[in-house]
């Protein structure tokens, strides 16, 4: 076995608790489903397609900010740092940093998909044969610990790209990042991608693409619950609905019931009114000041890189 994989540290989530979460969510007055359900095989494929869409400016903009500023970003992170990536997926984004940094001490990819993790570790090990890779199979939103290592990095840097932090409610986002900061200690870096507030049309277009890829991504959640938990959602009776909620500064994604209907799940029936919705995702948008304030209990903002139109920010913090 690849020696990097023999060190794979596991914190496997339990299938039963996922069914409980689904049932709990569908029992609330505003019915909801956990966003992590998006990412089965088909959902992950569709998400990769979303990232390529004209309307979905986030990925493209973040990549070009990284590319345009890679030397500066790497000099801020410094030599010999240990990179820890939350939700590393196929570990594509990290390659820019790995290629720009001088002698990174190691790379800790953390992901909830074991398959993604194994494949990406194998590919990285081929391309960066001297890199120490310490993979962790975990839901990084739950407590986990870093693997043991026998070297001394100059500092640890958490890398959290993609504005995934926007998918958590602000209170939770702040708790989660503050906890990680406390766990990793003073002087730990945080390099994070944050989608910035902007006009409603640009935001709404990004979540209502003309090719309906986002709609398919959203509705795939129902297909998945049918397949994995024996529910009987009739997909044609549901529709994708996404809009910008100005008051809360967030895109809301819902699945709307087109008819009054009953759905069977785990031996009971759930009633839906016509036009009733299931909330599937929030995607919060921030100003740089709001985000700085959000995690100010544990972090000091050191640097900001952005694009010409200020659509997206890459922020570098250090724990205090
Ligand atoms: C993963 N996350 C940052 C995406 C977002 O933009 O909030 C998920 C997504 N949902 C619909 N399109 C993309």
Image: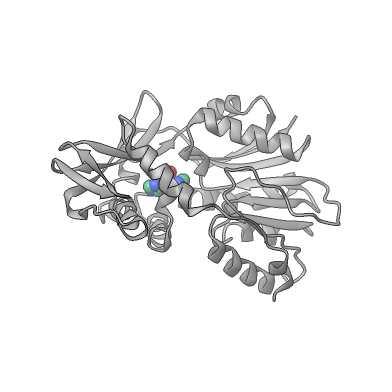
Q: Is the residue 271 above or below the residue 124 in the image?
A: above
Question: For this rendering, which residue is in front, 260 or 279?
Answer: 260
Q: Quadrant of the N terminus?
A: bottom right
Q: Residue at x 38, y 62 (%)?
A: 42
Residue placed most toward the observer, 29 or 125: 29
Q: Decide if residue 287 is in sight here.
A: no
Q: Residue 57, position in %: x, y?
A: 41, 48
Task: Name which residue lies at 65% across and 52% down.
Answer: 70
Number of numbered discs present?
0
Asked where in the image residue 107 lies, by quadrant, the reply is bottom right
Residue lying farthest bottom? 1
Q: Is residue 103 above or below residue 302?
A: below
Horizontally, is 226 left or right of 98 in the view? Answer: left
Q: Residue furthest front?
A: 267
Which image quarter holds the C terminus? top right
Residue 254 % position (x, y): 30, 40
Q: Could you say which is closer to the camera, residue 105 or residue 113?
A: 113
* Identity of the residue drawn at 33% across and 35% down: 27
- List x then y, in percent, for residue 230: 31, 57
Q: Is residue 107 visible?
A: yes
Q: Residue at x 33, y 39 (%)?
A: 26
Image coordinates of residue 32 in percent, x first then y, are 35, 38
Instruction: Tell me how the rendering is colored.
Output: one colour
Q: Is residue 213 left or right of residue 100?
A: left
Taking depth in this image into account, of 172 and 129 the one nearest to the observer is 172
Instruction: Identify whether 102 is placed above or below 282.
Output: below
């Amino acid at each position: 076995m690849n020696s990097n994989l023999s060190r794979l540290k596991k914190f496997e989530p339990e299938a039963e608790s996922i069914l409980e979460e689904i049932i709990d969510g569908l029992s609330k007055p505003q019915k909801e489903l956990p966003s992590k359900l998006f990412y089965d095989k088909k959902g992950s494929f569709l998400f990769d397609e979303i990232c390529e869409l004209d309307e979905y400016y986030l990925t493209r903009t973040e990549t070009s900010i990284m590319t345009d500023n890679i030397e500066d970003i790497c000099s801020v992170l410094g030599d010999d740092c240990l990179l820890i990536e939350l939700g590393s997926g196929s570990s594509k984004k990290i390659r820019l940093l790995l290629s720009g940094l001088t002698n990174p001490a190691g790379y800790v990819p953390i992901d909830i998909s074991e398959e993604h993790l194994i494949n990406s570790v194998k590919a990285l090990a081929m391309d960066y044969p001297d890199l120490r890779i310490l993979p962790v199979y975990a839901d990084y939103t739950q407590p986990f610990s870093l693997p043991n290592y026998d070297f001394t990095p100059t500092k640890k840097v958490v890398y959290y790209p993609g504005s995934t932090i926007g998918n958590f409610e602000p209170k939770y986002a702040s708790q989660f990042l503050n906890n990680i900061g406390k766990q990793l200690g003073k002087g730990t870096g945080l390099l994070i991608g944050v989608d910035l507030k902007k006009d409603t049309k640009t935001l709404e277009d990004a979540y209502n693409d003309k090719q309906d890829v986002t709609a398919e991504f959203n509705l795939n959640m129902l297909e998945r619950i049918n397949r994995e938990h024996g529910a009987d959602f009739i997909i044609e009776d549901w529709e994708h609905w996404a809009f910008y909620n100005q008051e809360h500064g967030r895109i809301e994604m819902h699945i709307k019931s087109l008819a009054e209907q009953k759905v069977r799940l785990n031996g009971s029936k759930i009633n839906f009114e016509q036009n009733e919705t299931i909330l599937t995702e929030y995607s919060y948008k921030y100003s740089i000041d709001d985000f700085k304030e959000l995690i100010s209990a544990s972090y000091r903002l050191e640097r900001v890189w952005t694009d010409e139109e200020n659509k997206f920010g890459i922020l570098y913090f250090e724990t205090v």
